[in-house]
């Protein structure tokens, strides 16, 4: 039986059932999951009994894996697993994963390890729907712009209050990365256009700091419209996969001091391409130790 797919909202998200993660990967199943990601942008699986190696194996169905992070160490005993742990980091900000490198991950997988008694949701937003919501003049302007992303940029991280958080924050910025991306990215599989901005976006090329901030705020407001968002409430043994090329996400810090832990594994991506066909360009930092470059056929 092929997997069953049930939409969660009109614009983003679906629950997938009927996938046996213990069996060798079936090409038709992987094709179905890829189509589901292309359509729904984020897919969720319940009752997934995977360890770190199993999560790496399943993520590997979609391509070569990145290491855990360009700067932050992997979970002990692994190469590809990053702990998204409330003890070290609470992002609490909209972002797309690792956009400060030349080829950010194409997919992100998150597996629930420790869930909270309330709150702690992950929000995922459809950046293609946001682009389609723009007025025609604003779309034309966005199509023409480039944005510099960096891990040195303050994306509203609160001041570290513990030794572990200070250590994490210092590791995060220990090597500087900066990349110029198109503000509107063309998805290599679907041809959809999506706003490629988020928390690591520092400035728009050719604009002043204040102009950049104002325009990015306006564009970001389209991404985070409620109708473009999946709000996922975690339960034990769940796996969330989202297309990092055309979404943003946000970990909501609304669970007081309860522990929260997800493990993240990401899949190597391609170099973003804009509406004009121009590819992203690296400005600082070499991330070749972190990720291979996925070559996508034209």
Image (cartoon, rainbow, N blue to C red):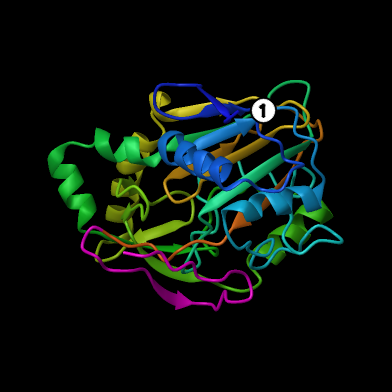
Q: Measured from the top left, where is residue 108 in percent x and y?
A: 59, 49
As drawn, the residue found furthest toward the front would be: 1
How many numbered markers are drawn? 1
Lateral position of residue 287 relative to residue 103, left or right: right
Q: Main secondary structure of the magenta part?
A: loop
Q: Is residue 230 above or below residue 198?
A: above
Q: In this picture, which residue range is highlighted in magenta?
A: 275-298
Q: Is residue 281 above or below residue 45?
A: below
Residue highlighted by disc 1:
254
Q: Measured from the top left, where is residue 148 in percent x and y?
A: 39, 64
Residue that appears at 36% across and 68% down? 280
Q: Is residue 294 magenta?
A: yes
Q: Measured from the top left, where is residue 121 in percent x and y?
A: 63, 29
**Front residue of this view, candidates 140 and 33:** 33
Q: Can residue 229 be seen in this snapshot?
A: yes
Q: Is residue 176 above or below residue 3?
A: below
Residue that appears at 29% across and 40% down? 131
Residue that appears at 61% across and 32% down? 44
Crowd tier of the residue under label 1, counting other residues whose Cα lies within 10 Å: few below 14, some 14–19, many 20 or above: few
Lateral position of residue 294 relative to residue 66, left or right: left
As drawn, the residue found furthest toward the left would be: 137
Q: Can residue 93 be seen in this snapshot?
A: no
């Amino acid at each position: 039986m092929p997997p069953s797919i049930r939409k969660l909202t009109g614009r983003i998200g679906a629950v997938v059932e009927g996938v046996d993660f213990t069996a060798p990967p079936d090409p038709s199943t992987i094709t179905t999951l890829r189509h589901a990601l292309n359509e729904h942008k984020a897919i969720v699986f319940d009752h997934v009994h995977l360890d770190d190696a199993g999560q790496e194996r399943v993520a590997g169905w979609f391509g070569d894996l990145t290491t855990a992070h360009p700067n932050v160490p992997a979970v002990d005993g692994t190469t590809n697993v990053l702990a998204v742990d409330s003890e070290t980091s609470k992002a609490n900000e909209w972002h797309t994963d690792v956009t400060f490198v030349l080829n950010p991950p194409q997919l992100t997988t998150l597996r629930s390890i420790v869930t909270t008694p309330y709150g702690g949701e992950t929000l995922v937003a459809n950046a293609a729907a946001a682009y389609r919501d723009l007025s025609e003049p604003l779309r034309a302007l966005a199509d023409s712009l480039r944005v510099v992303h960096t891990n040195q940029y303050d994306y509203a991280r609160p001041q570290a209050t513990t030794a572990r958080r200070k250590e994490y924050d210092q590791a995060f910025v220990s090597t500087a990365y900066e990349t110029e991306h198109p503000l509107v990215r063309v998805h290599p599989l679907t041809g959809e256009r999506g706003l490629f901005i988020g928390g690591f976006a520092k400035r728009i090329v050719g604009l002043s700091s204040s102009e950049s901030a104002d325009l990015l705020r306006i564009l970001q407001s389209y991404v985070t419209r409620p109708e473009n968002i999946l709000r996922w409430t975690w339960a034990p043994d769940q796996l969330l996969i989202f297309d990092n090329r055309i979404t943003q996400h946000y970990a909501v810090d609304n669970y007081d001091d309860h522990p929260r832990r997800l493990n993240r594994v990401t899949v190597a991506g391609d170099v973003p391409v804009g509406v004009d066909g121009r590819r992203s360009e690296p400005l600082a930092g070499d991330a070749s130790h972190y990720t291979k470059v996925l070559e996508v056929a034209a």
